[in-house]
Amino acid sequence: MINYSLCNTNTDKFSGGITNDNKNGHNYQLLYKNFINKNLNTILEIGTANGGFAKFLLDNGIKLFVVGTDIMPEAKHFHVSDTTNYNHLYSDFYIGDSFTTDFLAWIETKQYKFDLIIEDAEHIISQQIFMISNVDKLLNDGGVYICEDVQSYLNANIIMQSIPERYKKYSYIWEASKSIGRTDDICIVIDTR
């Protein structure tokens, strides 16, 4: 049983009623409970902030191969109350701009493919388009890709057009900004399960 109360201070990945009812839960509650520990072995988190998601996994005894990437992994992030840096908890880490061919080359050199990819970086449409258009280089068959914090429904529709053709039938917009009350809770999900 996953203890979501362990994450309240060190990551915002579960904001929006995670310990309340499922109707108002964030995308992670609605998605993760369906596949954590079910053939999930590798995770890529793009934009780790203080690494609170890796801490959440370890606190719950979920031992996976988790790769993190952030342009400034030592920076203080004040959107969560625990400002301790947990980025050392990742299995591997890329420091730099993930929205470049250099990052994709690093991934290829490592021969990584992922069962879950969380894109939670700068929330800039050009970056979101770059990453989602390269999803075929990153995602395992049967994997899930989440592009977080799309800033508008219009942006979401534009980003959806950049999804490689083979993934379009698995793609949808998850919109919870009204139920959660934050303007950036629009996500694009590619769920090939």
Image (cartoon, helix red, strand yellow):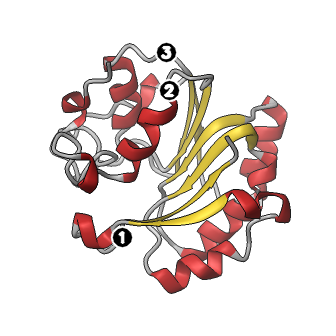
Q: Disc 3 to disc 1, how far (Cα)? A: 30 Å
Under mark 2, the amino acid is: Tyr
* SS type, badge 2: loop
Q: Earlier in the sequence, mark 2 or mark 1?
A: 2
Q: Earlier in the sequence, mark 2 or mark 3?
A: 3
The residue that appears at 33% across and 28% down in the rendered structure is 56
* SS type, badge 3: loop
Location of residue 87 with respect to 187 vertically, above or below: above
Crowding at dot 3, Cα within 10 Å, few <14 / some 14-19 / many 20+, comes out as: some
Where is mark 2, residue-wise?
A: 90
Under mark 3, the amino acid is: Lys
Work out whether residue 187 can be spotted: yes
Q: Disc 2 to disc 3, how far (Cα)? A: 11 Å
Q: Earlier in the sequence, mark 3 or mark 1?
A: 3
Work out whether residue 182 can be spotted: no
Q: Which mark is residue 63?
A: 3
Crowding at dot 2, Cα within 10 Å, few <14 / some 14-19 / many 20+, comes out as: many
Under mark 1, the amino acid is: Asp
**Residue 88 at x, y percent in the picture:** 44, 26
Q: Are marks 2 and 1 in contact (CB under 8 Å)?
A: no
Nearer the viewer's eye, disc 2 or disc 1? 1
- Closer to us: 29 or 97: 29
Q: Are marks 3 and 1 in contact (CB under 8 Å)?
A: no
Nearer the viewer's eye, disc 2 or disc 3? 3
The residue that appears at 38% across and 19% down in the rendered structure is 58
